[in-house]
Image (cartoon, grey):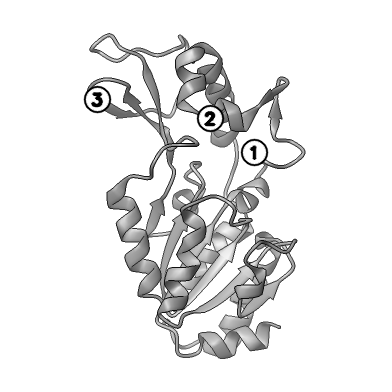
Amino acid sequence: MYSSIIEKLKNAKKIVFVTGAGISQESGIPTFRGKDGLWRNYDAMKLATIEAFYENPNLVWEWYNERRNNIFSSEPNLGHKAIVEMEKFFEVIVLTQNIDGLHQRAGSSQVLELHGSIVKIKCTVCNYREVIYTKFSKIPPLCPCGNILRPDVVWFGEALPQNVWKKAIIHSMDCNVMIIAGTSLVVSPANTLPIYAKQNNATLIEINPDETIMTDDMDLSIRSTSSVALPKLVSVLNKNLGGRGS
């Protein structure tokens, strides 16, 4: 399997990773859709909406406070670190659906956060934005203008920031290889990125323990987790392309 991937990578210059909750789960961060996707008998997928926020901002912020604590105590895993290692051989762009910042903490130099970041907050009324790495002692937190602050993330039903989405499309159409790691590809519009890559004749590689709705469209699939498969891939790259990145 890995020898087949090396053949696909030999002439590649630019690789785009599309990552999802699976790679973060390996660092101890719960997913929305897994068996750990419920929080205090609430459906997390229903809490991550603007409707839930306006109905009960205290509840949503209590949940996000716990998520922030969990994320801040987590560390990048071997999958995150392997993606960084691949920068020795290729231009690597990470398009992540995760809001935890673990790719940046691992050392990836080019990361686009499609769904925002949990460390960022913004006002629900004015243009105020801030980056905060601590737990909020008072919820909901208030903007200097007096209105309620919210997490600067993309909730279900909201559009992605257009500047970020346009860059993601451009990178997808300009890559030689796209590696889809730890995502079931059910969330739109991120699940259309492989289509843009395929239009440019890019090779599509899927790393996921289970089949996804786009498995049949992949050129290669690895039935494993990112923290297992990606270090193996880097090891094979070092043996076959060891002098390329020096």
- Residue 140, horizontal then vertical, whole percent: 44, 12
Of badges 2 and 3, nearer the viewer stands 2
Q: Residue at x 73, y 21 (%)?
A: 41
User: Could you tell me if the residues under marks 1 and 2 are in contact, i.e. CB atoms within 8 Å?
Assistant: yes
Mark-to-mark CA distance, 2 and 3: 21 Å
Q: Which residue is under mark 1?
A: 32
Q: Reading the chain from its start, which is encountered first: label 1 or label 2? A: 1
Q: Which residue is under mark 2?
A: 48
- Residue 36, horizontal then vertical, whole percent: 74, 36
Residue 28, quarter of the rendered image: top right
- Residue 190, horizontal then vertical, whole percent: 48, 55
Q: Which residue is under mark 3?
A: 128
- Residue lying farthest to the right in this orientation: 35
Mark-to-mark CA distance, 1 and 2: 10 Å
Q: Amino acid at mark 2?
A: Ala
Mark-to-mark CA distance, 1 and 3: 28 Å
Q: Reading the chain from its start, which is encountered first: label 2 or label 3? A: 2
- Residue 101 vertical placement versus 44 (above, below): below
Q: Reading the chain from its start, which is encountered first: label 1 or label 3? A: 1
**SS at mark 3 in the image:** loop
Badge 2 crowding class, 10 Å Cα cut-off, few under 14, some 14 to 19, many 20 or more, is: some
Taking the image as shown, residue 129 lies to the left or right of residue 3, namely left
Dot label at residue 44: none
Taking the image as shown, residue 234 lies to the left or right of residue 146, namely right
Q: Residue at x 38, y 42 (%)?
A: 159
